[in-house]
Image (cartoon, helix red, strand yellow):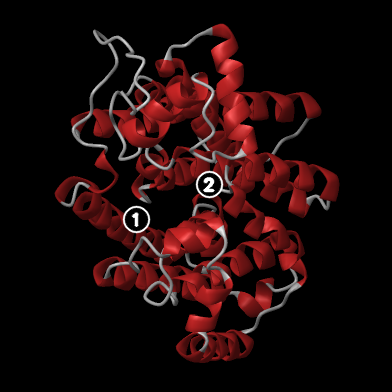
Amino acid sequence: MHVYLVTIISSLMLFFLCSPRRKRKDIAVRSHLKKRLTIRRTAIGVALAAFPPMIVAAVRYKVGTDYVATYYTGFYRILNGSTVDGFEFGYYWFNRLIQVFTDNVFVLFAITAVIFVAVSFAAIYEESYNVPLSILLFFVTRYYFVGMNIVRQFIAAAILVYSIRYVLHHDLKKYIVCIILAFSMHYTSIIFLPVYFLPRLRISVKRLITIIIGELAFFSFGVGWFISFLQDTKYGRLIARHDVCGIKFTIFTVAVNIVILLVGYCGYKERKNDERYRLYLNIQVMAVLITLVFRSIPLMERVYWYFSFPCIITIPYLFLSVKERSYRLLVTAIVIAVFIIYLFYDIVILGDHDVLPYQWIFGKSPVHYSGWQ
């Protein structure tokens, strides 16, 4: 775990060493030149902060549950002309493009790591109110570690988080481009398409309670129909092979997401006309609604990730609902502490996602192994 601790500390230190002391959006600029200089320094800080997690993920070896069975051997199955894995078209042709230049599978892991971390940090730079907090959340929410296992889906998730800026800019064309790119990496990402319309919704507390009651009622009686509806799809076939989320994970995830949502709702009356606030709040609403069916439908965690991963940029803005700075810092510290505790329990104690122990590729050579030999 020491490799990851050094990575987190190095990332934050590089940001603070190279960026302005104050948060980018709080800096009062007196001239156009000064504003450009400030933004440039912040961009350099974010870019340098991305290097430690990028490098550690890029040179990993057999780190991640799916490292060998899905991605390592899948690379060579594609090289052999097989399509048995049913990879999404974007990921498939991405592999083929790499194979034009090399048959070294380590290159695949390096490039996918760079894409995942780079796009995630670009989203943080473009959209986060509090960049260092977002960088910290990127790690403590476990998503950095999950991304080294669930590679295709988290590349898609990173693209979707970046696409949020186009929702706020009302740029439907660029948003659709992002959706298509994410879809080409993982087909389930299409579920994020309606997010473009979320800023239009004003979900008061009363409406939220009504929605939750309706959801619980539907899935109490209609879950069998819902699963049967999906039975002939790729997702339906996966459901048949997986169990629902564990009770401990469900309790933690429901609880922490409800806390985040309640903090966000603290300023609803004053902030409900803020489009960014409504978008971020409604994404969090979606995350909560999905957690409530964890124990009813298998693999709903996969759907949840699309609406939870944006928390790396939504939490800093939603927590502004706590007006008193000292209270806001306390609430933020508590949420971060809870994330860290669960990170330690899940990644270190349970060994989830198989990112421990960390190994790197140095001294190792790629073997052309497709899993069929």
The residue closer to the viewer here, 296 or 82, is 82
Q: Amino acid at mark 2?
A: Asn
Amino acid type, mark 1: Ile
Q: Is residue 269 visible?
A: yes
Name the image quarter holding the N terminus. Answer: top left
Residue 202 position in % (x across, y down): 71, 77
Residue 228 x %, y % = 53, 75
Say whether residue 171 is visible: no
Q: Residue at horizontal 29%, vertical 15%?
A: 361
What residue appears at the point 73 percent right and 74 percent down from the top-left corner?
201
Quarter assignment of residue 336? bottom left
The one nearer the camera, 171 or 189, is 189
Residue 273 lies, in percent from the top left, at: 75, 71
In percent of width and height, residue 223 lies at 49, 82
> Helix or strand or loop: what does disc 1 sit on?
helix
Q: Secondary structure at mark 2?
A: loop
Circle count: 2
Left or right of residue 84: residue 197: right
**Residue at point 43% right, 68% down?**
257
Residue 213 in the image: above or below residue 310: below
Seen at 52% across and 86% down, the residue is: 222
**Which of the two marks, 1 or 2, is nearer to us in this view?**
1
Question: Label 1, on which residue?
Answer: 336
Between the C-alphas of marks 1 and 2, the distance is 14 Å
Q: Which mark is residue 357?
A: none
Q: Residues within 10 Å of mark 1 (few under 14, many from 20)?
A: some
Circle 2 is placed at which residue position?
Answer: 130
